[in-house]
Image: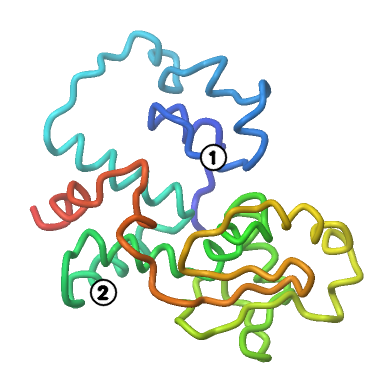
Amino acid sequence: MARIDSKCKLCRREGEKLLLKGERCLSSKCAFQRRSYVPGIHGPKRPGRQTDFGKQLREKQKAKRVYGVSETQFANYYEKAMKMKGDSGVNLVQLLELRLDNVLYRAGLAKSRAAARQIASHSHIAINDKNVNIPSYRVRPGEVIVIQSRKQNKTPWKTIGENLKNHETPSWMTLDPSALSVKITSLPAADDLKQIFDPKLIIEYYSR
């Protein structure tokens, strides 16, 4: 079984907010605001100097933690990105963005990617009228993701429609708050793929 670390410790280790707990990360309860140094007894005294390899490793770890994927999954995404045409760094981020759990999060149907994974795995989702309970499912242009009708009258879906009306979604998807559905209209464009990590350093890490 994969090891699961405290989400607040992960943010502190990477030196910035990864928004792993959704709205809590934007509140005064955020642990990173109170202790913005590396976890551990030597955290406040630990030097900040890094080697090139250290920088590459930290970018890889940051991306892996943002999207909540395991080491093996992330390495597989790298392999797929390298086989695709075009910029490998852009391909890598695009593959991560097209994960079902990330799409649910981007669409506002979940407050965090962790919550989105739970929603998907608990069979709340249908894609093109077919039940899908795999959070890592890769969505494709033209597919419509909807909260199953038998679930829409239950918590938390009863009240989420009003909150979604003011939610801003990426340009590659269209949200219908009343139907609790989102349609993938295209592949994510370059402007939609800007992240807090540098994908070029990640490619360098695996290519070393």
The amino acid on which the numbered mark 2 sits, given as a three-letter code, is Lys
Above or below: residue 202 compared with residue 155: above
Q: Which residue ends up furthest to the left in the rendered image? A: 208
Using residue 202 as the reference point, say whether residue 176 is left or right of it.
right
Instruction: Give the mark toward the camera: 1 or 2.
Output: 1
Task: Name, please, the residue furthest toward the bottom.
Answer: 129
Callout 1 amino acid: Leu
Provide the residue designation for mark 2: 80
Position of 9 relative to 138 (above/below): above
Near mark 1 (Cα within 10 A), the count class, few <14, some 14-19 or many ≥20, is some
Q: Which residue occupies 66% across, 50% down?
A: 111
Q: Is residue 181 left or right of residue 188?
A: right
Using the image, determine if residue 4 lies above or below residue 161.
Answer: above
Give the x, y percent position of residue 97: 43, 63
Assess disc 2: are there few (<14), some (14-19) or many (≥20) residues with their C-alpha within 10 Å of its C-alpha: some
Horizontal placement of 177 versus 168: left or right?
A: right
Q: Which mark is residue 19?
A: 1
x, y percentage for residue 29? 68, 23
